[in-house]
């Protein structure tokens, strides 16, 4: 009787009660386990960004194109040419399948649902613009595996002086509120008096100390007006520019979706979907998980009347620039993207041997960004064996507004990122915009011979855009160009000040 009752209870609790705890491994251990899974005995050495290192990366343009001919974005794998928009949708599916299987990994069918909840609403000021701030958390349904909790952190900021829905730029960054409102001077006086009284009650000897320092306050008054720290080019912060232009913005923290390391692959949203077990070779990596998290953020934003859901964009720099491009490529609901200094795994072609290379993404430091299968292209396969490349990832964004942004090496946007190669990839993607009736870069040369425009010369006349600014590893100097470019394309008018 007792055994029958115990069995009934266990069945009632379901499989979640019987699941094993999450596997714990270091990044090196997980990396070696994936190599064993794939039957890989060794990988090619990882190029170094240090010019003095014996295995330094190549920066000789004459050696940069060992695989000069890339897969044609408008040719099916069977050799048939794409000539119509309908055929492009079929080709698009073919390209995405290759990225899923070989490069970025697949989002599992059992990816958990996200329940969004507003933690608080605040009213702040960004410069002269009053804004409404919502601190939001997206709780993943972990009922199938309670050992892992995922809470996606997002902050939504919308201008309070604009009527009707506004365009919103989602940004991969920490989800802190931009300018938390402060207590008034009278409220601070009351808080300080209460805090001092409480301190004396807790320790009466502090009365003499506080009397000796009568001007000291536990909660000092902030300055009446604090000017923002300007960007390096002298412009206000990106968020201030967006608010002044009548845009909203959402700050989504990628690492609240998935950790940026290999040890975290059995936790986060990837670990939750796998019930704490290591990945299989086709499972998604962190880049694809961050993009998936942005799409879940879009789900929530699209329910709000103050958000123009037809004009939501995505932005990121460096590794988050890669994730922003992937988000745009996979989710057609996003209307625009600002891809900042994305490099290898983003706008830089894998087939280019210049700076960062495929081997950097297959080594133990960055492999977690990619699908397990991608390790094979660091040995025994080569980058030339990849069925797809960066130009096709960019092309998946067509005909929507896609802005590829870089800085200059002299200011810290290192040669490592291969600016020239990224321009070549953007040029190689251009024919898809043209096929779909949009304008590309208006670059007449093909990618083999195309050369970057001069610094600070933007190609901004079409729906595919390029600009290399004269700043560093940031997209801030291009933000004002991005905003005006998007406004012109979507017919949005900034509010009068």
Image (tube, grey):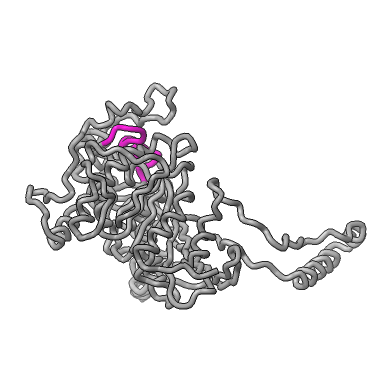
Residue 26 at x, y percent in the picture: 42, 42
Residue 458 at x, y percent in the picture: 37, 48
Front one among 456 and 65: 456
- In this picture, is 85 found above or below 53? below
- In this picture, is 79 found above or below 363? below
Left or right of residue 213: residue 111: left
Left or right of residue 350: residue 303: right
Front one among 104 and 464: 464
Q: Quadrant of the N terminus?
A: bottom left
Residue 395 at x, y percent in the picture: 24, 52
- In this picture, is 53 found above or below 122? above
The picture quadrant where one finds residue 364 is top left
Instruction: State whether residue 7 appears in this view.
Output: yes
Question: Does 481 appear in magenta?
Answer: no
Residue at image point 51% right, 65% down = 243
Residue at image point 30% right, 55% down = 462
Front one among 360 and 37: 360
Left or right of residue 233: residue 21: left
Left or right of residue 161: residue 29: left
Residue 133 at x, y percent in the picture: 54, 69
- In this picture, is 390 found above or below 494? above
Q: Quadrant of the C terminus?
A: bottom right
Question: Does 353 appear in magenta?
Answer: yes
The tally of labels here is: 0
Instruction: State whether residue 24 appears in this view.
Output: no
Front one among 424 and 250: 424
- Magenta segment range? 352-368
The picture quadrant where one finds residue 489 is bottom left
């Amino acid at each position: 009787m007792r055994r029958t009752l115990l069995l009934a209870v266990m069945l009632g609790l379901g499989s979640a009660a019987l699941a094993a705890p999450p596997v714990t491994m270091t990044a090196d251990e997980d990396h070696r386990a994936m190599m064993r899974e794939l039957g890989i005995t060794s990988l090619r050495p990882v190029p170094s960004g240090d010019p003095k290192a014996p295995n330094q990366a190549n920066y000789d343009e004459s050696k940069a194109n060992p695989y000069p001919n890339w897969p044609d974005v408008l040719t099916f794998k069977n050799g048939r040419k794409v000539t119509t928009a309908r055929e492009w949708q079929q080709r698009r599916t073919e390209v995405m399948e290759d990225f899923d299987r070989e490069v970025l990994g697949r989002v599992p069918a059992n990816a958990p649902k996200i329940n969004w909840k507003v933690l608080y609403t605040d009213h702040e000021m960004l410069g002269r613009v009053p804004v409404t701030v919502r601190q939001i958390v997206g709780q993943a349904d972990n009922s199938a595996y309670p050992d892992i909790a995922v809470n996606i952190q997002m902050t939504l900021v919308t201008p309070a002086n604009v009527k009707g829905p506004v365009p919103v730029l989602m940004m991969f960054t920490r989800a802190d509120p931009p300018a938390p409102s402060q207590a008034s001077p009278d409220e601070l006086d009351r808080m300080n008096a209460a805090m001092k009284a409480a301190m004396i009650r807790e320790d009466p000897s502090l009365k003499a100390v506080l009397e000796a320092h009568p001007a000291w306050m536990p909660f000092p008054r902030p300055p009446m007006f604090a000017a923002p720290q300007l960007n390096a080019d002298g412009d206000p912060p990106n968020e201030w520019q967006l608010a002044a232009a009548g845009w909203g913005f959402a700050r989504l923290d990628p690492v609240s979706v998935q950790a940026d390391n290999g040890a975290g692959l059995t936790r986060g949203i990837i670990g939750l979907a796998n019930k704490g077990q290591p990945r299989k070779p086709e499972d998604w990596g962190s880049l694809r998980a961050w993009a998936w998290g942005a799409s879940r953020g879009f789900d929530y934003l699209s329910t709000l009347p103050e958000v123009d859901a037809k004009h939501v964009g995505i932005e990121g720099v460096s590794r988050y620039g890669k994730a922003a491009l992937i988000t745009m490529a996979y989710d057609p609901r996003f209307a625009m993207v600002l891809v900042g200094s994305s490099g290898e795994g983003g706008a830089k072609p894998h087939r280019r041997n210049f700076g960062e290379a495929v081997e950097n993404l297959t080594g133990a430091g960055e492999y977690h960004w990619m699908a397990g299968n991608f390790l094979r292209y660091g040995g025994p396969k080569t980058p030339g064996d990849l069925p797809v490349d960066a130009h096709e990832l960019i092309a998946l964004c067509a005909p929507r507004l896609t802005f590829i942004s870089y800085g200059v090496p002299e200011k810290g946007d290192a040669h490592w990122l291969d600016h020239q190669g990224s321009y070549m990839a953007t040029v190689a993607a251009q024919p898809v915009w043209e096929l779909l009736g949009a304008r590309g870069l208006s670059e007449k040369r093909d990618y083999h011979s195309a050369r970057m425009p001069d610094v600070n010369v933007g190609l901004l006349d079409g729906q595919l855009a390029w600009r290399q600014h004269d700043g560093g590893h940031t997209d801030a100097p291009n933000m004002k160009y991005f905003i005006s470019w998007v406004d012109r394309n979507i017919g949005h008018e900034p509010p009068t000040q």
